[in-house]
Image (cartoon, helix red, strand yellow):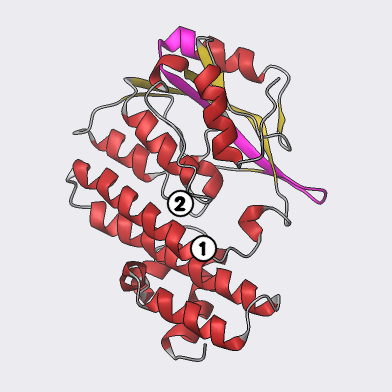
């Protein structure tokens, strides 16, 4: 048991990585649930397939419902930057579901994590960036077609609360994500990235709406924040075509509403 001052989830995970001496590493958030054979099944799959990491499927749960997340997972993937299936695998992380990029629901060989740490200065998408870098340095990835990890949906969590530094956070995510995917040199990469960056811009706008509606922002500060988003590099991707290409129909509807309000200067 390690006692430390609260420095956020990334700080806690990094400390765990610094002192871990075991052959395998798993990340389980304190408010989530796992199947009783979660570790055992992932371990057996890694050993059988001689992989560096193994995923399982994930479900969301709350007091009202349990929802299994349907997503394409390759049974086995040998990482090769030039191959289409490798490129598609990494682009699958750029989705409307933040939990897709989470290190939870995976078992890693400790050796592939040695040079990687979470970015403590980020509070959103830091796990996505961590996982992208780690997986790119794996030789083989395996997955298990079983729902073994249960992610708790909490409306009071950081993901659902107002964040006054969110634009700054996502501009850094934008920079690092762009640098990561540009190495694939794939003709479809720009289209995929535009869709993701459009989503980040949408989240920034809706974040400011939360601030205004919850009376945390006065009208002048709200206008200032909206102007900052419009002036940012993310705003160039906030186009109608990029919004239509988003994966989730609920997100598309939200995008269209926000897009009309922003483009017509109603907000």
Against 156, residue 69 (above or below) is above
Q: Residue furthest right?
A: 63
Residue 254 vs residue 128: left or right?
right
Q: Is 62 on the left or on the right of 261, as rendered?
A: right
Marks 1 and 2, how far apart in space? 22 Å
Q: Which residue is mark 2?
A: 95
> What is the span of residues highlighted in magenta in the rendered image?
46-67
Judge by depth and name the residue closer to the eye, 131 or 224: 224
The residue at 50%/73% (across/down) is 205
Residue 27, numbered circle:
none
| Picture coordinates of residue 256, whole percent (x, y) | 49, 77
Q: How far across and how far down the image is residue 245, in percent?
A: 39, 64
Which residue is denoted by mark 1 in the rendering? 165
Find numbered disc 2 in the image and state the secondary structure of the residue it sits on.
loop
Q: Is residue 67 left or right of residue 258?
A: right
Q: How far from the left and from the top, in percent, is residue 182?
A: 22, 47
In-front residue for pair 150/130: 130
Q: Residues within 10 Å of mark 1 (few under 14, many from 20)?
A: few
**Residue 54 visible in this rendered orientation of the protein:** yes
Which residue is depicted at the point 25% across and 51% down? 189
Is residue 197 found left or right of 180 in the rendered image?
right
Residue 218 lies, with reference to residue 118, above or below; the image says below
Q: Would you say residue 57 sits in the magenta stretch?
A: yes
Q: Position of residue 237 (x, y in %)?
A: 33, 69
Say which quarter of the image contains residue 82: top left
């Amino acid at each position: 048991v390690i006692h430390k001052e609260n420095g956020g989830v990334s700080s806690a995970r990094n400390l765990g990585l610094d002192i871990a001496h075991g052959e395998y590493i798993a990340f389980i958030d304190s408010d989530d649930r796992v199947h009783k054979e979660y570790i055992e099944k992932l371990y057996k799959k890694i050993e059988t397939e001689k992989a560096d990491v193994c995923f399982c499927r994930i479900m969301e749960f709350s007091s009202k419902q349990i929802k299994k997340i349907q997503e394409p997972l390759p049974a086995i993937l040998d990482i090769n930057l030039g191959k289409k299936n490798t490129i598609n695998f990494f682009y699958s992380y750029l989705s409307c579901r933040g939990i897709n990029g989470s290190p939870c629901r995976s078992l890693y060989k400790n050796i592939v994590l040695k040079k990687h740490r979470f970015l403590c200065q980020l509070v959103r998408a830091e796990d996505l960036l961590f996982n992208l870098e780690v997986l790119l340095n794996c030789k083989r990835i395996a997955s298990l077609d079983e729902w073994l990890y249960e992610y708790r949906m909490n409306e009071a969590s950081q993901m659902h609360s107002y964040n006054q530094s969110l634009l700054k956070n996502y501009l850094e995510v934008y920079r690092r994500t762009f640098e990561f995917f540009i190495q694939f040199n794939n003709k479809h990469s720009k289209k995929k990235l535009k869709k993701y960056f459009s989503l980040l811009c949408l989240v920034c706008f809706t974040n400011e709406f939360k601030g205004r509606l919850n009376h945390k922002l006065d009208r002048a500060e709200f206008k200032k924040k909206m102007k900052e988003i419009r002036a940012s590099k993310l705003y160039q991707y906030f186009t109608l075509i990029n919004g239509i290409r988003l994966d989730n129909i609920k997100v598309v509807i939200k995008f269209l509403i926000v897009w009309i309000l922003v483009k017509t200067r109603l907000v």
